[in-house]
Image (cartoon, rainbow, N blue to C red):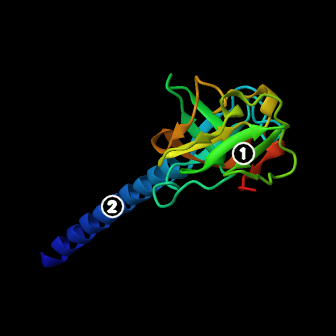
Amino acid sequence: MDFYHSEDNNRLRHFVNWIVDIVVVIAFAWFLVYAYGTQIVVAGHSMLPLFASGDVVLMDRLSYDFGKPDRFDVVVFQREDQKMNVKRIVGLPGETVQIKNDEIYINGEKLEEPAGLGRISLAGLAEKPMKLGEEEYFLLGDNRDSSEDSRFSNIGNVSGSQIKGKIWLRMLPLVKLELIRSK
């Protein structure tokens, strides 16, 4: 008789272990998708040549929970109207940003930008020096003449709480699949 109880216990233990394994795998998969797999569809041409309208990118939600955004990070932020936008960080908290003669100046010094970023023909609010607050960032699109960004009053300086994550991968179109790194 003990033999049968032992076999039933082994089956029950095997079944419970199997269920626990499945729950752990599902929880781990959910964590990965939530943390690193948030899909964002790029709208408009403000990030050309890096991203075109309709490109699908993945956002890392956790990167700024453990660190601060860096200059030239490509980020997703939520506008006041709740729309999500993709832009590049140019100005960091506490800095003074000004755009003059088609160039960006940070704290009075010309910013050396990565090659391939668009020229700035309209300074907008940054025509005069703009002092960023403790949690404020100055964001620009790469296609500077076709970007609604921190230069304009409807966007303005972006608070750290509005930044939702960092873009780390272009997923679609597949022919342009690539990791996105800060430059």
Q: Position of residue 67 (x, y in %)?
A: 51, 60
Please tell me which residue is depicted at 56% across the width and 36% down the height of the picture.
157
Query: Taking the image as drawn, is residue 27 in sight?
Result: yes
- Is 180 or 81 nearer to us in this picture? 81
Residue underneath mark 1: 170
Q: Position of residue 81 (x, y in %)?
A: 50, 22
The amino acid type, in three-letter code, at marker 2 is Val
Query: In the image, what residue occupies the spot 76% across and 29% down?
Result: 53
Residue at coordinates 12% horizontally, 75% vertically from top-left?
1
Residue 15 shown left or right of residue 90 in the figure: left
Q: Nearer the viewer, mark 2 or mark 1?
A: 1
Q: Secondary structure at mark 1?
A: strand
Residue drawn at the location 51% of the way across and 49% of the way down: 61
Count of numbered marks? 2
Binning the other alpha carbons within 10 Å of mark 1 as few (below 14), some (14 to 19) or many (20 upward) gives: many
Given residues 104 and 108, the one toward you in this image is 108
Quarter in which the C terminus is drawn: bottom right
Quick one: SS at disc 2?
helix
Q: Choose the circle earlier in sequence order: 2 or 1.
A: 2
Name which residue type carries label 1: Arg
Indicate whether 45 appears above or below 25: above
Q: CA distance from mark 2 to mark 1?
A: 34 Å
Of residue 15 and residue 31, the one placed in the foreground of this image is: 31
Q: Which residue is mark 2?
A: 20
Residue 29, x across and y down, in percent: 48, 53
| Mark sitting on residue 159 | none
Please provide percent x and percent y for residue 74. 67, 46
Classify 10 Å Cα crowding around label 2: few (below 14), some (14-19), many (20 and above): few
As rendered, which of 24 and 125 lies closer to the eye?
Answer: 125
The residue sitting at the bottom extreme is 2
Is any part of residue 74 visible from this angle?
A: no
